[in-house]
Amino acid sequence: MRRKWGDRPAQSPVARSTAARLTVARSAMARLTVARSAMARSAMARSAMARSAMARLTAAWSTLARSTVARSLVALLAATALLLALAKVLGPALGHSRLERVERTALLMDTPVRVVVYAGRREAGAATDAAIEQIARLESLWHPGRPDSDVARVNAAAGTEPVSVAPETLELAQIAVQVARETGGAFDPTIGPLSAAWGFGEGGRVPGATELASARALVDWRDLHVDSEAGTIFLARPGMQVEFGAVAKGLAARLVRDNLAEAGVSAALVQLGGSIALLGERPQGGPWQIAVQHPRDPQGFLATLSLEEGFADTAGDYQRFFEHDGVRYHHILDPATGLPAAGMASVTVVASRGELADAYATAAFVLGMEEGYRFLLEHGVEGLLVSDSGEVRMTPGMARLARVTPGE
């Protein structure tokens, strides 16, 4: 059969079918290429899951690109199957490049609270709200001024009977007793009577010698009994009071951070006063930058910490204090003397758990420069200690994390 110049030969049904499949196969390869490129651009490529998915995509793309079968029906089937198999992995990864930043603030646990979440558009707001709600719930359990809180009920039943408490309160008490034991009582969760005598929750006042002695007699962590099996807390003597303020914010920060991680949040910062928890890699790249307040300059910073993840906490004499007859009295009390701990201005601790960063910062402050420094080294955490005379001392690990402001 003759055909004119420019005529195309008629295609058989089989040829047309094959051509259609080749077109789909090439389309599938194009989709793989787009997915691979998007994955490479995504900030999530730094995570372990994304790197694994990226490697699988690259290998598959390279194999298909080199293979002569790539233009066959086999390539179509392979490409389609691979796209389906990786959909669950690629979906979250590709979405990471569209992270949304949501920030919420509140006043809870008698301190400013700030939660910053980086997540997908739909998840970020809900996760941030849930974090604030969780902190509010913990406040309802731990605030001594709320008559129905676990702490208030334990104090009211002092010397009478054990009190059943929520699991979070039980964990809080267990940690407090642990640190009290480790510090020989320099950190004491039964400090409540002394805090009340100094009236820090009411603006502050200087107690008389008799009142101070009576309050000191009620402070002894060994009379705080925590029964993990029964889920109860018991204060052995009437008049005793637990006060978990020096560990509660650190534990709250850690619990919130853990919940955000379980919810699939990519990165977050949780701050309760001087307690900070960090989750994931900083979306902007590089370590998180955490400023350490200068203890004598309200507008200045003593140092900046570069942290990948984890927890940081600062105990300082500038956070809550009052002046009387020209003398400055701060809220970090020494259980041994009943007076504000002497010799230190601030202690910043970086640790793997928020509750330890919080409690160890207070303990080191009470112990003083030499004993406090040694304690932090022995317990494997990093510290930046500042004396009330201006001396600055850092553990070896902290020296690598902190950039001290010039002139300090």
Image: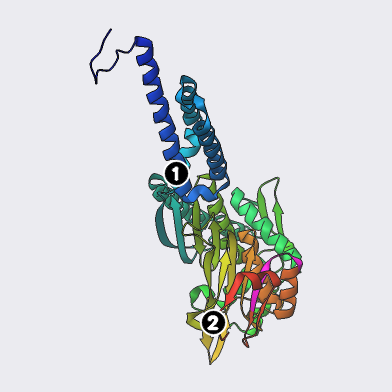
Q: Mark 1: which secondary structure? A: helix
Binning the other alpha carbons within 10 Å of mark 1 as few (below 14), some (14 to 19) or many (20 upward) gives: some
CA distance for labels 2 and 1: 65 Å
Binning the other alpha carbons within 10 Å of mark 2 as few (below 14), some (14 to 19) or many (20 upward) gives: some
Q: Residue 314: x and y, percent?
A: 58, 71
Q: Earlier in the sequence, mark 2 or mark 1?
A: 1
Residue 380 drawn in magenta: yes
Q: Residue 115: x and y, percent?
A: 46, 58
Q: Amino acid at mark 2?
A: Arg
Q: Which label sits on residue 205?
A: 2
Residue 192 drawn in magenta: no
Q: Residue 221: x and y, percent?
A: 71, 65
Classify 129 as above or below 6.
below
For residue 68, say whether it is visible: yes
Give the label, 2 or 1, closer to the camera: 1
Q: Which residue is mark 1?
A: 37
Say which residue appears at 55% left-offset and 83% top-offset. 406
- Which of these two is toward me, 25 or 397? 25
Which image quarter holds the C terminus?
bottom right
Q: Is residue 103 left or right of residue 142?
A: left
- Which of these two is toward me, 288 or 149? 288
Provide the residue span drawn in magenta: 378-385
Which image quarter holds the N terminus?
top left
Q: Which label sits on residue 378?
A: none
Residue 215 found in image quarter? bottom right
Q: Amino acid at mark 1?
A: Ser
